[in-house]
Amino acid sequence: MTADYNMALERQAELAKRLAGGYEKTIATLEAAQVDPSRLDAILKRTPLSMQGDDLADVYASIDWRRSLDNTLHALQFGATYACTSQIGAWLETAARSIPDTFALEPSDPPAPEGFFWIAAPCAAEGPCVHAYSWRAQPEHVDMAAFGHLGKGQALTILFEAPWPFGMTISDGLYGNGLVDSAINERVCADNPEMARLGERIARFWSATFVFLQQRVFSISVDPADRHTRHRLERTGVNLDPRVRVIHLRRKIGEPSGEEPYGETVHEWHWQWLVRGHWRNQYFPSQRRNRPVFVQPYVKGPKDKPLKPVATTVYSVDR
């Protein structure tokens, strides 16, 4: 196992230790803010993206933040560790941008009851730099969190934390999720576009990840941490499983043939061509509904024909 995957365990333990160490202070700050909303200034200073005080007060009054914090800590302390390369992380981020807004999370989607998903490098160019995600499934929702760096050289911290109820779609917005009044949700998103974009980005990334794992686009190998990493974990006092579930891109088994389906017009194709990866809403009879599925890139056309060259567009600028 490479150093990047060993790092996943170390960073999970680091976050768990730091969050547990500051737990009582965080709880005290949040409880004080519930009694005196002006105390939210202390929280706003640690918010990764600018958020208006009135909006933050409404959000904190509408969600069970103690339960959310407890579940984030539990996922860090006991959750299964997943890791992927920066290339797979970037591929997921790209595919996530176009996933249909109608995607809704289902209880069978998370790959484990709780876990920590580490990306070897930040998976998106836009800030803040997201390095990892955690989740813990509940009977009616999943408590999710995102971790990253607010600036170069700064320690990992919580960037975003929110519940995601089963059955709610991406288009329901940042804090919609069925737990906050829709009017509050619309105002929070309108007043805080940076935070809204971060929330949507996280929702889309997890949607794509869950879909790909369900479709077996990925394969997972379970690799033990090296001896030095296991010793460092022991010193943190966090009792993590010293194994990492490493995400690999599964090799495609078989390819669509160039033959036309029965009953359709037969064409005499002169080329093979590349069909780009794309999302498709597919009906599942057993569930009586549509769900997005990702159609992987593949080569179509007769196997005995050459691959069609990619067209090059030349632009002429005349004055």
Image (spheres, rainbow, N blue to C red):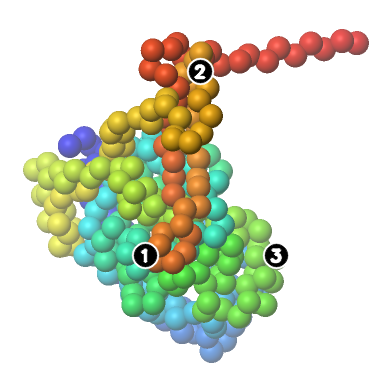
Give the mark nearer the N terminus: 2 vs 3.
Answer: 3
How many numbered badges does the structure rendering display?
Answer: 3
Residue at the front extreme?
A: 263
Classify 172 as above or below 14: below
Where in the figure is residue 179, as x and y percent of width and height? 52, 79
Amino acid under label 3? Ala
Select label 2 or label 3 by which is in front: 2
What residue does disc 3 label?
A: 190
User: Mark 1 and mark 2: span between their CA atoms?
Assistant: 37 Å
Q: CA distance from mark 2 to mark 3?
A: 51 Å
Residue 16, x across and y down, in percent: 28, 62
Pointer 1: what residue?
A: 286
Neighbour tally class for label 2: few under 14, some 14-19, many 20 plus, Cα within 10 Å: few
Q: Earlier in the sequence, mark 3 or mark 1?
A: 3
In the displayed structure, does residue 173 sit left or right of residue 76? right
Residue 306: tell me if it is visible: yes
- Depth check, mark 3 against mark 1: the one in front is 1
Q: Nearer the viewer, residue 249 or 267?
A: 267
Q: Label 2, on which residue?
A: 269
Q: Position of residue 39 (x, y in %)?
A: 56, 79
Q: Name the residue: 49% across, 21% down.
A: 273
Q: Secondary structure at mark 2?
A: loop
Where is the N terminus found, in terms of image quarters? top left
Crowdedness near tag 1: few (<14), some (14–19) or many (≥20) residues, C-alpha within 10 Å: few
Quick one: SS at disc 1?
A: loop
The mark nearer the N terminus, 1 or 2, is 2
Residue 198 lies, in percent from the top left, at 55, 55
Nearest to viewer (mark 1 / mark 2): 2
Please, what secondary structure does the residue beneath circle 3 have? helix
Q: Residue at x 87, y 10 (%)?
A: 318
